[in-house]
Amino acid sequence: MRSNIRNFCIIAHIDHGKSTLADRLLQVTGSVSEREFHNQMLDSMDIERERGITIKSTAVTMYHENTEGEKFQLNLIDTPGHVDFSYEVSRALASCEGALLVVDAAQGVEAQTVANLYKAMEQELEIIPVVNKIDLPSANIDETLYEIDNELGLDPDGAMHVSAKTGQGIEELLEAIIERIPPPSGDADAPLRARVFDSIFDPYRGVIAYIRVVDGVMRSDRDISLMAMGNEYRVEEIGHLGIKREKCELLTNGDVGYVIAGIKSVSDVRSGETITTKLNPAEKTLGGFAQAKPVVFSSLFPISSEDYNDLALAMEKLKLNDASLIYEKVNSVGLGFGFRCGFLGLLHLEVVQERLEREFGMSLVLTAPTVLYRVSLTNGEIKYIDNPNLYPDPSRIELTEEPYIKASVIMPDKYIGPVTTLLLNRRGRDYSNTYVGARRVEIKVEMPLAEIVYDFYDKLKSLTQGYGSFDYEASGYHPGNLAKVDILVNHEKVDALSMLVHRDRANNWAKRACENLKEAIPRQQFKIPIQGTIGGAIIARTTISALRKDVTAKCYGGDITRKRKLLEKQKAGKKRMKMVGKVMIPQKAFLAVLKRD
Amino acid sequence: MATEKIGLYVHAPFCVKKCSYCAFNSVEKPRDTSGMCTALSTEFIRRTQQPDLEYQTFYAGGGTPTLLPPEFWKRMIDMVRAPWLKEVTIETNPAVLDAIDYSSLHIAGFNRISVGVQSFCDKNLKLLGRRHTAEEARETLQLISRTGFKNISLDLMYGLPGQTPEHQKNDIIEALSFMPQHISTYDLTLEPGTPMGNRGEKASEDQCAEMYHQIHEILTANGYVHYEVSSYALEDKYRSMHNSSYWDRTSYIGIGPSAHSFSGTKRSWNIPGIPEYESALLKGELPEDSSEEITDENAVNEILSIGFRNTNGVDLNELDKFGFRLDPTDLLHTGLIEQKGDFLVPDEKGMLFADLLALKASELLEKTSGV
C-alpha cells in the first residue's frame, strides 16, 4: 500500500470547466511555473485547444502537502469526455481510485455528466462532486446540489464548491482529494502488471505509452511483454509525467508514468493492454482489453486524384497516433482511389478530417457517413455492410438490421415539445421523460444510430438554444426496412452519393437530396438532370438549368486587375471541386445530400 | 528613341446626381470646379513629362465630364499637342437641363462623343435614376449630329428588371434609327452598395442571354460589327480605339481620382477621395494610391481574362512570350471558339462565356521550359 499517492481523474460535460480546473490544480500545487503556464495545459493538440475538448488521455503528477505537512503525490489522469472515446475513458478511469465529477453551477447536470458518472461507478471509484463556477452571477448552487442528489444519487453534502476560474475552494478540494480518495492498492512484490491507458507517437522516440502500475515494479533496461498482443520489447526509458516527461529509474505499484520501449505504432500497444516483465511474467492480465470498434463509416477521397499517394502517406502517419482509426483502400467510379474509414463516432470523424486537412494539407471529399448494417442473406449467410455500394441485391436479402442506441437528452423543460418532435421524427421509440431538477427534463428514447450521424446534434443545440445535452449508448441491432437510394448526376451514377435509407422515407429523402444537390452544384454550359433511384426506378428528379452566360458587361482600365484576381480566385476554388463525368461537383455537395430542413 | 503608343484617360469625378446602378467614383458637382480642373491639369503635366510617348487616344470619362467647362478640356487637349492623337472622346449625359455647348466641345478638339442614352423608355430611365427622358435623348442626339460630330457612340443598357426581349427590341430599333457609328450595349451589372444592387432586381439570366443574342442579330443584320461583348461598330474604323487599347495591352495613363494607369509591366491606381487627391497634388506628389508589378503569370491571366471577350481573341504567341503554353484542344471542344492561325477567337456565343473560357484556359496553361 502506498499511502501517499492519490490517482484521480476529472469527469465533466463539455464547457463545465474541466480544463480550467486542471490548470488551477497545477498552479496551486506549484507544478507549473508562472512562466510556463498557459490555458488548457493538458490539451496539446490544436484541435483540442480550439474546440475546448480532450481527444487523447494524458496524465500529470503533482505534489501537495496536507495541513499536517505530509507530502502527497497526486496523479491526475485527464480523459476525453465525449462518447466517441468512451473506451479510452473507461481505461483511464480503471487507472484511478477516485474521480472529481464537475458540474457547472449555472448549467446543472448534463447528459454527458450522467454517462461518465456511470462509467466511474462501474470502476467503483470514490466520487467527489464538484460544483464549479460558483463565482458566476447566474450560478444556482442550490438547484445544482438538488440535481446532484436527485439525478446523480450522490450526497450533496459532500460536494465541494469551487471556482476554477478564480481559484476559490481549490485548497479545500486538494484536501478532499487526499482525505477521501483511497490510496492505490496492489502488491509491490507481485510480478509487474501495468495498465496502458493511452499512448502517443513521438517522431523521435516512437511510441510513448502512458501507464498505471498496478502490481510490482517497472525498471528501465528490462524486457517487457504486452500480454494482449503478445509482443516483447526492451524498456528504453520510464518516468513520471510532470509538465514535461521526468525520467526515473523505477515505477512501483500505484505510480502513473510513461514508458518508451521502441514500439513503432500506437496500434501495437493499445489502451487496456497489460504490460508485464519477460523474466517474471504475471499470470493474468488486468482485464478490460478490447479493440475499439468503429461505428461510423465514410470514404475519403483526395479532391485531385494525383494526391492519392499523399493521402495514403498521411493516413499512415495519422494511424501511428490513432489506434482507433481503421481504413482500407477503395475505388469509386466517380472519385477514383480513396479510403473507406471506420470511426468511433462523428467527433472522431471530424477530428480525423480536420487533422488530415490541417496537418497534412489534404483537400478531401468525404462521403455521407453511414453505420454498420447487419444483413442476413437468404442462403443463411450474415454480412456486415458499412458501404452502401456493397449492399446486396434485395432479392438475396432475408433481413436487414440496423444498430440502435439508447439516447438521453437533458434540457430545460420549455424545450420538451420541439425536442420530442425531433426525436420521434428520427424514429425514436420507447419514449419516456422525467424531471431531473425543478425545471429540467431528461428524455430517454431508443433510436437508430443512423438517425444521429448527421446534423442531429446541431439540430438539438439549435432547438434548445444550446441548453440541450445529449449522450447515448449502443443498444444492439433491430430490424430495419431499408432501401438503397442511388443518385445519378447527368445520367451517371455517382457511387459516392448512394445511401441506405429507411424505406418509408426513401422518396422524401431522394427528393431532398436532389434539391440539395441542385443548390450545391454550380450550373454548367449544359442542362444537368439529377435523379434519385431505387433499383433503377426513378423516385425523384430535378434539373440544373444550363448556364446561359458567364461574362461581365464592362472591362475597362480599372476592371482588368479585378478580373484577373477573380480568375485567380475561381481557379483556386476549382481545386475544391471534383470532376464526375462531365460535371464539376464541389466538395460540399457530397455532404449536401444529407442536409435536412 | 523609340516612341511608345499610349492612351490617355481623364476622370471627371462629378455628377449632378448619381444614377441608381452606378458604382463609379463620382460625387455631387460642387459650385466651383476650378480646383479639380487645376488638380487634373497638374497631374497631367506631372505624368506626361516623358517625351517618348505617342498619345493616340484621349478619353474624357466620369462622372459627367461635360460638367467641367469646354475651355478646360480644350486646354487639356492642347497640352497633348500631339499630331498623332487620333481619337478624342467625351462622354455625355443627354439631359437638356445641363445645356451643354456641344459645338464648343467639338471646337475644343473632341472628335467622338459617347451618349449615355441607356434606354428609349421613360419607365426604364426612371428606374435607372437617369436625369433625362427618352425625348431629351432624341433631341440631344439630333443636336450633336448637327454640331459636327461625325463619330457618335450610343450607350444602351439591357437586362433591366421587368424588361423583356420584346421591350428591349424597341430600344435597339430606335437606336438604329440614329445610325450611330458605334453602339455599346451593357447588360445591367448589379453593383453592391448601389440602390439597384441592394434591391438585387434584374431580368432573368435566360432573358438577358436572349436579349444579348437579339441585339447581335439586329445590329449585325444592319451592318454593325460585333467586335466585343458589349461593343458594336458600324465599320471597323469606328471601333473604339481607346477601349480597344485596354484590351490589347497598350499602355495608358489615367488622370483623376481613382483612375488607373498601366505601363506595360506595372498597374497603378490613384487615390479615390477627392480632397486627398487634390491635396496630394498640392504637396507636389503623384496622387497614387497603390501599384502592382505584373508578373508573367499575372500578364497571362490578364490576357485570358480579356481575350475571349473580343473578336481579336487570345494570341497563343503572346502567351508564349510570357513563358506559357496552352493546348487549345479542350477549349475547341466547347464549340465556343475557333482557332485562326495562332489566335483563339470566340464567336458571338463564345464571348458570352468569356469568363468560363478564361477559367478553362487558365487551367490548361503550362509553363514552357527555360523561362
Image (tube, helix red, strand yellow):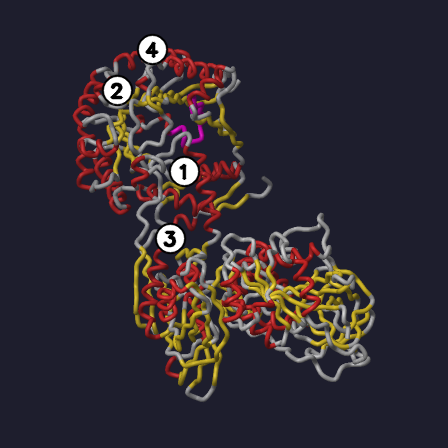
Please tell me the numbered disc located at residue B71: 4
Which residue carries the number 3 mark?
A522
- Which SS class for mark 3? loop
- Of the residues under marks 2 and 4, which one precedes in the sequence? 4
- Of the residues under marks 4 and 1, which one precedes in the sequence? 4
Q: In the image, which is nearer the foreground, mark 2 or mark 3?
A: 3
The answer to which image quadrant residue B161 occupies is top left
Which residue carries the number 1 mark?
B307
The reply to whether callout 1 and callout 2 are in contact (CB within 8 Å) is: no
> Tag 4, which chain?
B
The vertical placement of A547 against B43, above or below, is below
Residue type, numbered disc 1: Gly
Q: Position of residue A261 (x, y in %)?
A: 76, 68
> Tag 1, which chain?
B
- Which stretch appears magenta? B244-257
- Of the residues under marks 1 and 2, which one precedes in the sequence? 2
Residue type, numbered disc 3: Pro
Q: Nearer the viewer, residue B266 or A84?
A: A84
Q: Is residue A230 left or right of residue A542?
A: right
